[in-house]
Image: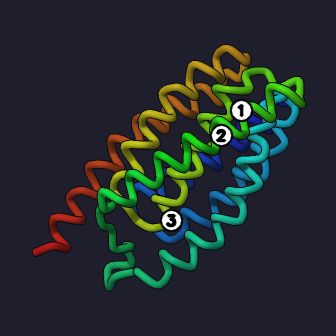
Amino acid sequence: MDIWEAIGAGTSLLGIYLGARRSVLTWPVGMIGIALYGWIFFDAKLYSDMLLQAVFAGSQVYGWANWKRNVQADDKVRVGTASPNELLFGVAGAAIGAVMLGAFMAAKTDAAAPWLDASLTCLSLTGQLWTARRLIQSWYLWLAVDLVYVGLFIAKDLRITAGLYGCFVILCFYGIKVWRSAAVAEAV
């Protein structure tokens, strides 16, 4: 499993890096990492995260199409900020989803961390939607989610994946910097 986890981690890291750079290639590269992590999470009995990978696969298509329509002359995607309503509905939707998914996973499966896994899954769905919509706030949400994921993956002895999510935390700071600079430059 470690070799597949390493390949999945490397592919996922490249995909997130490309997203921070505002490159449309983030989406096809991300699809490879998603497929590998679906299998890794199934093996680790992190079923909510396994399901998340399946949903991510569909959202990759949406994100790729949306980003392709918003590429500028420099081959970088245009970014923006979320409205207060988008933020409220995103967080509220994640909370409702977390309660529903967590209750199901706790009652019907042998999930290792049903409530935490479900919460992170639903917040990740919100983050994925915000990323596909090119919203700067996605990086702040990913930062919070990735920090918690590091601890979960350490607890599940997924050391390579914990390291990957530690790298994601660093990339979140990079993404925030790049996207905020781009938003300021585009507003001028």
Q: Quadrant of residue 105?
A: top right
Determine the CA span between mark 1 and mark 2.
Answer: 26 Å
Disc 2 crowd rating (10 Å Cα; few below 14, some 14-19, many 20+) is many
Quarter of the image that includes the N terminus: top right
Mark nearest the camera among 2 and 3 is: 3
Q: Which mark is residue 132?
A: 3
Give the farthest residue toward the left: 188
Precedes in sequence: disc 3 or disc 1: 1
Precedes in sequence: disc 1 or disc 2: 2
Disc 3 crowd rating (10 Å Cα; few below 14, some 14-19, many 20+) is many
Q: Residue 124, can we see it? A: yes
Q: Which mark is residue 9?
A: 2
Residue at the (75%, 31%) spot, across then down: 103
Q: According to the image, what is the colour scheme of the structure? A: rainbow
Q: Residue 3, can we see it? A: no
Residue at the (33%, 41%) spot, across then down: 173
Amino acid found under the numbered disc labelled 1 = Gly
Mark nearest the camera among 1 and 2 is: 1
Precedes in sequence: disc 2 or disc 3: 2
Residue at the (46%, 46%) spot, across then down: 91
Amino acid found under the numbered disc labelled 2 = Ala
Which residue is at the front of the view, 40 or 125? 125
Query: With 46 as the anchor, is 109 left or right in this view?
Result: right
Q: Which residue, given by chain and number where applicable, does mark 1 sit on? A: 102
At which x and y percent is residue 54?
77, 54
Residue at the (55%, 40%) spot, across then down: 95
Determine the CA span between mark 2 and mark 3.
Answer: 21 Å
